[in-house]
Image: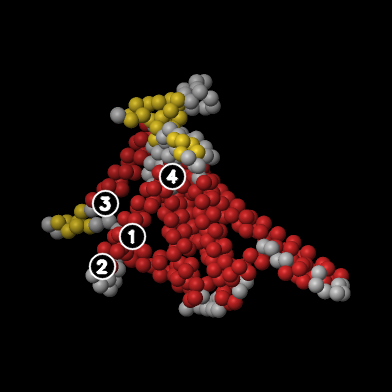
Amino acid sequence: MAEVAEVKGKRRVGFKRWLILGFIILEIILAGLYPPIPPAVELAAEPLTDTVSIPILGDVALTNTILTVFIADILLILAAIAVYRAYQGGGLQAPRGIAGVFEMIVEAMYNLVQSVAGSKWARTFFPLVGTILILVLTVNFMKLLPGMESIGFVHEIHEGEGYDLQAFGPVSILAEPAEGETGHYNIIPWFRPASTDLNFTLSIALVAMISVQIIGLRAGGIGYFEKFANFRNFIKMWAREKLGAFDILMPFIDIFIGILELIAEFARIISFTFRLFGSMFAGAVLLGVVGSLFLFVQTGFLFLEIFFGGVQAFVFAMLTLVFLTMATQTHGGGGHEEPHEAH
């Protein structure tokens, strides 16, 4: 809420309201002088530096999505330091600001993890599930920041449709070329939402599913892998003197189910990867296209992106939690205690 100050009996509008009004007026003026243009839709993240050859990894370059992830990591580290300092020295009776927001998120997420996984596994699952939720949430919301995918290096293109350059003080602005002409320039944005990069979503999915296998092995021991390769009945079959049709069929059914379970684990990785990537990439394209056609209509879509960005982060974290819980209950008795105990 904007500040309202009382000076000599008169009420005046605070600085924050003037600042917001100034930004709106500036946006209207700039949109009139330099109409927004449709963004260049690139599926792969654009490199910002030349490639460097690294042993084992091969050719590596700093991309705009990696830079965005670094910024998100720095923001979260600074937020963690701020929360720690807020609670330093005995803690707060009534946390305010960023400390209160983080306490609300952490407490709600921990209670949810405990209600799904049980008190035995809550402390084990929470660091991974909470990290995925907060990181993906931060990355998704960063796409709403000004300058995202609109500020970057101008480069000359030789194929396809481009734009003209117009000087705006010390910077250049892309503009639609004159009718019948072809522009020769485009932009490589410095910042792009990391969740619109398939490499980011795949890496999070791999971390989640590898953690699922580690937890499953920890809970069920070596017997956890029987869900993928159950040859126990197949071996017992040869020790029997008399075999019925059912005794012969069941071992092969167990083996077939194990193959399906193995395929399902890889399918989960693919599903994880493309669910988040598809939703966020489509949203980024929609915001850019709508913003180039109808300037103020984009505001309504921004609220939708806030909603869908939060939903996708929550779904990703919850599916990770569910798969972790299922891994503790598949084999071995360790995962059967308090699986759905609510607190």
Q: Is residue 315 above or below residue 236?
A: above
Along the polypeptide, which appears first: circle 1 or circle 2?
A: 1
* Percent position of residue 64, x then y: 43, 41
Asked if marks 3 and 2 touch (Cβ < 8 Å), the reply is no
Q: Amino acid at mark 3?
A: Lys
Separation of marks 3 and 4 at Cα, in angstroms: 33 Å
Q: Amino acid at mark 1?
A: Ala
* Percent position of residue 39, x then y: 48, 36
Per the image, label 4 sits on a secondary structure element best described as helix
The dot on residue 66 is 4
Q: Is residue 57 above or below residue 320?
A: above
Which residue position is annotated with label 1? 80
- For image coordinates 44% across by 60% down, the residue present is 131
Residue mark closest to the camera, 1 vs 3? 1
Along the polypeptide, which appears first: circle 4 or circle 1?
A: 4
Q: Which color scheme is applied? A: secondary structure
The dot on residue 106 is none
- For image coordinates 57% across by 62% down, the residue present is 213
Report the residue that reaches farthest toward the top: 180
Q: Amino acid at mark 2?
A: Gln
Per the image, label 1 sits on a secondary structure element best described as helix
Which residue position is annotated with label 3? 16
Separation of marks 4 and 2 at Cα, in angstroms: 33 Å
Mark 1: few/some/many CA within 10 Å (<14, 14-19, 20+): some
Query: Do we see residue 126 in this rendering?
Result: yes
Mark 2: few/some/many CA within 10 Å (<14, 14-19, 20+): few
Separation of marks 1 and 3 at Cα, in angstroms: 27 Å
The dot on residue 88 is 2
Q: Amino acid at mark 4?
A: Ile
* Percent position of residue 254, x then y: 74, 66
Along the polypeptide, which appears first: circle 3 or circle 2?
A: 3
